[in-house]
Image: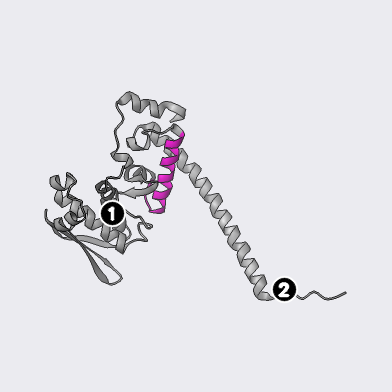
Amino acid sequence: PAEIDPCPPEVVERHVTAAQTTTRGLQRLAAEVEAMKNAATMARGIAASGFVPDHWLKDKTPDQAVASMATAILYGAELGMSAMRSVNELFIVRGKPSMYARTASALVRAAGYVMEPVEETDERVVWKAYRDGTWKFCEWTMERAKQAGYTSNALYQKNPKEMLRSKAIMELCRITFPDVLMGLDYSVDELQLIDTTVQRVGKKLNNDEDRANLRGKGGL
């Protein structure tokens, strides 16, 4: 009988590598499914305790509330945050995770980087961060905020320094430390300025009875 040509070694190696990659992918998927179950268990416990911001419960069924909180817990774990911190400091905006600028700066500092203010007044805020042997600077002024259309927001009249600080910190984090924030686009502070509905900033539950009903259905 005719001999069958052996498969070239490089082809065999490619098939073996592909099989190994698939196996690792399936193993990771199984681990993530198990992590989601554990996060859901944690979410149910937190919700039942009453120690949870209203935005995770408002306008949601019990299952939706648990799923949202569990997803936040998993995302927070990727950032190095505990479950309780994730529930209290993460938000869902347009279906994407978000956080306040102060949380972003805390994560950057926890990762071992230096971030600090250079100047902070009601008219001008400058922050700097050190990475890869150089200092990176970010400046936000009332004039820049005005050009961007942000000063029509009442918060710029009440707390101008705080608003400028949030813009400077988040822009510096986003540009200099995208890996620390896992590519986070905008902070809650920034999205509020462009009139985006943020779940936590929405209408609060009307009374304690409404809150109790939401937590009491379906095992919450």
- The spot of residue 53 in percent (x, y) is 32, 37
- The spot of residue 187 in percent (x, y) is 30, 51
Locate the N terminus by quadrant.
Answer: bottom right
What residue is drawn where x is 43% and y is 35%?
44
- Three-letter amino acid code of the residue under disc 2: Cys
Is residue 88 at least partly visible in the picture? yes
Q: Is residue 106 above or below residue 196?
A: below
Secondary structure state at the residue bearing disc 2: loop
**Callout 2 crowding tier (Cα within 10 Å): few <14, some 14–19, many ≥20:** few
- Is residue 77 part of the magenta span, yes or no? yes
For disc 2, the marked residue is 7
For disc 1, the marked residue is 106
Residue range highlighted in magenta: 63-82
Residue 182, picture quadrant: bottom left
- Is residue 73 part of the magenta span, yes or no? yes
Distance in Å between CA atoms under marks 1 and 2: 55 Å
Locate the C terminus by quadrant.
Answer: top left
Is residue 112 at least partly visible in the picture? no
Q: Is residue 67 above or below residue 173?
A: above
What residue is drawn where x is 43% and y is 42%?
70
Q: Is residue 203 above or below residue 175?
A: above
- Three-letter amino acid code of the residue under disc 1: Ala
Badge nearest the viewer, 1 or 2: 2
**Callout 1 crowding tier (Cα within 10 Å): few <14, some 14–19, many ≥20:** few
What residue is drawn where x is 13% and y is 45%?
158
Which tag, 1 or 2, sits closer to the chain's start? 2
What residue is drawn where x is 57% and y is 58%?
24
Q: Is residue 80 above or below residue 87?
A: below
Q: Are marks 1 and 2 in contact (CB under 8 Å)?
A: no
Residue 173, picture quadrant: bottom left
